[in-house]
Amino acid sequence: LRKLHPNTHLYTSQVFIKDFPGKVFTVEDVRRPGGGASDIGGAELVLRNYPGSVADLRARLKLAEGSDKRIFACTAHDDRKMLVVCSKAF
């Protein structure tokens, strides 16, 4: 289990951890924030250790609300900003 950044509070693993005490998602894609996300259609947007607000980023990405997808806008261990596109694992 690896933490993306000390202040991001998101964890990744190559293997499924059965008794993990949190929500579990499958990572589908990792993007740069400037790349946009309008091709996804809609998604729940969550910011973790990322500047700005959900409303501002949603408008910049041209991202509709809702869907079974979740996008985490976050900061990686090397202070790089990124968008992690996920779907619920269960």
Image: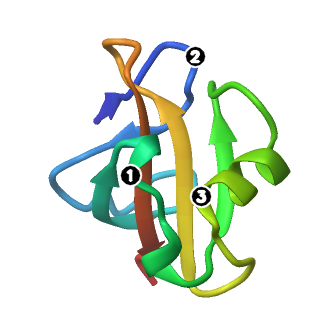
Crowding at mark 3 (Cα within 10 Å: few <14, some 14-19, many 20+): some
Q: Amino acid at mark 1?
A: Gly
Q: Which residue is mark 3?
A: 61
The residue that appears at 74% across and 58% down in the rendered structure is 59
Residue 10 at x, y = what percent?
A: 49, 37
Mark 3 secondary-structure assignment: helix
Q: Amino acid at mark 2?
A: Asn
> Which quarter of the picture shows residue 70?
bottom right
Foreground residue among 20 and 49: 49
Choose mark 1 or mark 2, whichever is in front.
Answer: 1
Q: Which residue is mark 1?
A: 35
Residue 67 at x, y = what percent?
A: 63, 87
Q: Amino acid at mark 3?
A: Leu
Q: Which residue is mark 2?
A: 7
The residue that appears at 81% across and 39% down in the rendered structure is 53
The N terminus lies in quadrant:
top left
Distance, label 3 to label 1, CA atoms, is 8 Å
The residue that appears at 47% across and 79% down in the rendered structure is 40
